[in-house]
Image (cartoon, helix red, strand yellow):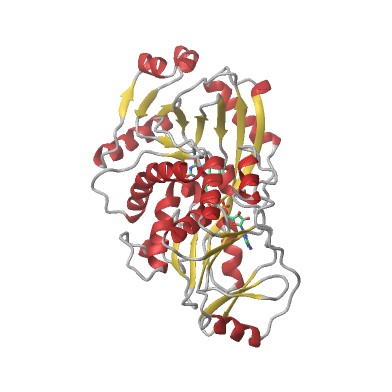
Amino acid sequence: MTGSLEIICQVSIESPASVYSNLNQEQPRSTSISTAELEKQQSFSSQSQPLCTVIIGAGVIGLSLAYELALRGRRVKLIDQGQIGQGSSWAGAGILPAVATHSIVDPLEQLRSFSHELHSQWAQQLRSQTGIDTGFRRCGGLYVARSKTEAATLVANELWWREHGVISQRVYEKDISNLEPSLMPLVASGQVIAAWYLPDECQVRNPRHLKALALACLQMGVQLCPNWAGTELIIRSNQAAIRDSSGELIPAKQICICSGAWARLHLEQMQLRSGIMPIRGQMILYRLDKPLLQRIVNEGHRYLVPRDDGRILAGSSEEEVGYRVATTPEIIDQLHVWASGLCPALTRDKIEKTWAGLRPGSFDGLPYLGSVPGATNLFLAAGHFRAGLHLSCATAVMMADLMDGRKPDIDLDPFRVGRG
Ligand SMILES: Cc1cc2nc3c(=O)[nH]c(=O)nc-3n(C[C@H](O)[C@H](O)[C@H](O)COP(=O)(O)OP(=O)(O)OC[C@H]3O[C@@H](n4cnc5c(N)ncnc54)[C@H](O)[C@@H]3O)c2cc1C
C-alpha cells in the first residue's frame, strides 16, 4: 500500500477535518493565458499518451463518475478546490428512499430506480476492492404524521407507492411500538395520526461511501487533486480547456463539471444561465451508547437516521442563504426540539456534532445532466438537490455513456443543460 493510501485509511470516519488532504497534492501556482498555450493543449492530442478526462468537483457525483470512467479504462483527473469528498456529499444523511418497481416512464424515477439497484452492487464492489464497509443497509423507513396536513400527504404518497410498486404497509400504534420501541412514548402520547412502513428504504454511510470511492479511484490510477483553487474554464473554437491559477493549461480530452452548488458559478463564467442554487441544510449528530432505532424515521422533510454504532443523525432544514455553510443556533435548536419530541432519549447532552451543507438545488427539482452548449468536450452533472447521494451511481453510468458517445438508456432530455 502506498503512503497516500495509508493516509486515506487512517482518517476518522465522519470527521470533516483534513480528510485526504495529503493525497496526491498538486498545487497550482499563479496566472496568465495565451492562444499559444491553447494550441499547446490541442497538440497534446497527437502525443502517444491518451489525454485524460478532467472532472471538476470531488463530491459524490464527481467521485462516482471518476470511478465509473476508471472502470471503463479511462485516465481521469479529479480536481477540487477543497478537500476530496467534503462538500454537500459529506454533510448529507445518506437516505436512499424506496423506489418505483413498475410503470416507470418518468426519466427521474428511472434514474432513481437504476441508482437504487446499483447502490447495492457498488457497496459490494467497493467493499471487495477497498475493504471499506460503506454502511449500505436495507434498514427500512417509517413515515409518521403528527398533523392532518402530513397525514394527507402520506395518504397521497400511498396512492403513488401502490401505483408504482413501492412496497408500503400502513402501521398503527402497536405496530410502531413493536418496530421501534423507542417511539413508544410518542405513540402513547396519542400524537401519531398516521404512519406507514417502507421496508425497502436503504441508507449508506456517506462519509464511508466517499472514502471507499476515493480509495477505489486511487487504486485504479485516478489522479485526485485537492486544493485546486482558482481553476478557470476557457472555451475557444467549441473546445473547453482548463487553466489553473498559474495560467497553465491542463490538457483534457473531456471535462465534466461536477461542482454541486458551485456549478452555477462555472456556468455563469461562460455566460450560461442555470437554475442551480445553494440550499443550506443543517444536521445534528447524536451519540448514544447503543442503537436506539433500527429504521429511518421520517416526518415531513425531517428525519432521524440511525447508524449501526448508536449514532443518530437528525436533519434537516432548507434555507436560501447563498454560499454560507455555517450552522445557526435557531435551526439547530428547532431540529433538536423536533428530534427529542419524537425520541425523548435524544437529550442535548447526547449531541456529538452539528454541521451544515449546501445542497445543489435546481429551479425545477431536476438535476442537470448532459453536454454543455458551446463546447463539444464539456459536460455537466450537477443540481441533484436532496437526492445526490441516491442518484449518484446512475448519474455516473449515464454520464459515462454520454461521454463515451453512447446513447444512454435513460432519456436525459428533461435534464438537459440550458433549460433554465
Ligand atoms: C443536510 C443534507 C442532507 C442530505 N441528505 C441526503 C440524503 O439523505 N440522500 C441523498 O441522496 N442526498 C442527500 N443530500 C443531498 C446530497 O448530499 C447532494 O445532492 C449531493 O451531495 C451533491 O453532490 P455533488 O457531488 O454534486 O456536490 P458536492 O458534494 O457539494 O461536491 C461538489 C464539490 O465541488 C467542489 N468545487 C466547487 N467549486 C469548485 C471549483 N471551482 N473547482 C474545483 N472544485 C470545486 C467542492 O469543493 C465540492 O467538493 C443531503 C444534503 C444535505 C446538505
Residues 143 and 294: in front is 294
Residues 387 and 257: in front is 257
Q: Residue at x 42, y 68 (%)?
A: 403
Res. 395 image quadrant: bottom left
Horizontal side of residue 143 vs 83, given as left or right:
left
Horizontal side of residue 124 vs 228, given as left or right:
left
Residue furthest front as drawn: 1
Q: Residue at x 47, y 18 (%)?
A: 183
Residues 250 and 31: in front is 250
Residue 361 seen by the camera: no
Residues 226 and 273: in front is 226
Residue furthest right as drawn: 30
Name above or below for residue 82 compared with residue 75.
above
Residue 72 rendering spot, x and y as whole percentages? 41, 61
Residue 386 rendering spot, x and y as whole percentages? 49, 46
Res. 119 image quadrant: top left
